[in-house]
Amino acid sequence: MVQIDFHGGVDEIGGNKIHVQGFRNSFFLDFGKSFNSEGDYFSEFLQPRKLNGIMDLVEFGLLPQIKGLYREDYLRHLGLNHYQKPSSDGILISHAHLDHVGYLHHIRDDIPFYMSEETYLIIKALEETGMAGFNNYLNYADDFQLLAKARLNKNSKTTHKRANAKDTKKSRPIEILEPYKDFEIGEFIIKSAPVDHSLPGSCAFLVDNGEESLVYTGNFRFHGKREYETKKFIKEANKFTPTTLITEGTRIDRDHNTTEEEIEKKARELSLSHKGLIIVNYPIRDLDRFLTFYEAVRDSDRTMVVNTKQAFLLNAFSGRGYPEIDDVAVYVPRRTWGLMGGESQVCFDGEWVCSSEIDREYILGDYKGWEKDYITWENNVNYLDLQERPEDYMFQCDYFEFKELIDIKPENAIYIKSKTEPFNDEMEIDGRRERNWLNHFGIEVHTGYHASGHACGPEILDMIRDISPEKVYPLHTREVGAFDVLKKEGIEVVHPELK
């Protein structure tokens, strides 16, 4: 018998944490952050405290209370019993969105993570370029350690320093999966199955322990650039004859989806007709959306301008069917001193000099280590380039980069919003700020350029019928009742409950 416990993703979008337990072994399907539930208690400026380990999240039911699951440095720091064997034999990761991987940081360092190579590359970029405080996804660095400092002489008392991440950093056990190739977690034989979603490397899982067979869809769609992957998964899942299907249902209440092809066509027409700067905002890890806009602007002789984080990710995906970093321009923002781009006055050795006379090493000191490779790239642009030749560019500008508009001072600019509409209070507040910025600069907003990462209702129901499981658990949805129509067709629909 297989026991399935749901610790997230129930009556909400995301936050999947599904514990699958067999006779001897167990594993998790995803271990994601519950944005809505966490947002009930925390915000950008009210964050869980590292000093309290996992307990701030446990307090509000955001992490399950399971012994032997969490990192021992946190438990030891709180004086809790940390001498436990691992209570899980692994975590299967369907894709690299934070609502599926955001709580991996809290997992102990001897539980392996299983993922596709593309998912690994995206999480690596997220870890190396991100600012989050809990981002030990692929690497593990012990916190709350003191290291002995070298003594000045033999009579000196031992002094200590705090260990930093470099002192204790080590790689977690990561298993890179090959599509449709069997691997084992104890009694379970598992296959990963690539699916089309809004970022590369997304996959479903087919699980068998000899008594029950389970299929987990992860997140999937049919209207992206890899529809064929989802269709192949459905065929393989049908041949698998599963007893249980756990499926996402984000858009079960919708009957239509905009396609990436439709977005590309609209963006190409807009790029050809507009004579000023085009600003676009899309999810940075959605490389298929990047590719949609990149291909749309080629006919208008515009150059796609990306930020340094996008450049980092493109470089990681070099040779995988996406444009190379040399095919785009990298936007160089001004940082603390504002020395890159334009002329600034700097007091140097008692005299005021122009920033162009300052050694490059001082200028690069404004930028993070990972950024420096892209700041010195030959195909760089800055705010002056976008001011002088706005018609030459499509400029990727995330919500958190709107400060760049103060430098660019765009005239006759348009803004393409290619993100999902707000679905919680915090996103609503961000949306109001977004409108304030765009109204201030007189920037015309164009919507309708977003293609969801999720299948619509008729596609989800047809997928379930094609796979033909004995029972279905709808997850990652607020409309679980919409699945009950399948009961008339002999498929048992089980409404999951939080453990």
Image (cartoon, grey):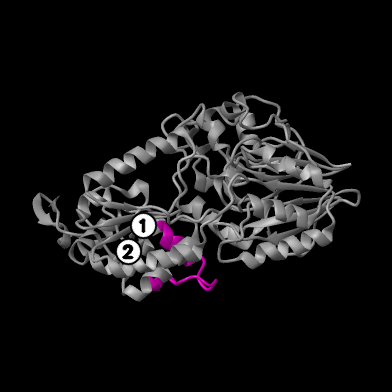
Mark 1 belongs to which amino acid? Answer: Val
The residue to which callout 2 is attached is: 394
Q: How many marks?
A: 2
| Residue at 29% over, 66% down | 393
> Along the polypeptide, which appears first: circle 1 or circle 2?
1
Residue 338, image x, y percentages: 22, 52
In the rendered structure, the answer to whether residue 125 lies left or right of residue 174 reads left
The residue to which callout 1 is attached is: 280
Residue 12, image x, y percentages: 60, 37
Mark 2 belongs to which amino acid? Answer: Met
Mark 1 → mark 2, Cα distance in angstroms: 7 Å
Nearest the viewer among 253 and 384 is: 253
In magenta, the rendered stretch is 309-329
Q: Residue 447 carries which label?
A: none
In the rendered structure, the answer to whether residue 485 lies left or right of residue 388 reads right
Which picture quadrant has residue 365? Answer: bottom left
| Residue at 10% over, 49% down | 350
Up-down: is 242 above or below 483? below
Disc 1 vs disc 2: Cβ atoms closer than 8 Å?
yes
> The N terminus is located in which quarter?
top right
Q: Is mark 1 on a helix, strand or loop?
A: strand
> Residue farthest to the front?
488
Residue 461, image x, y percentages: 70, 51
Which picture quadrant has residue 10? Answer: top right
- Within 10 Å of disc 2 (Cα), the crowding (few <14, some 14-19, many 20+) is many
| Residue 53 can be seen in this image | yes
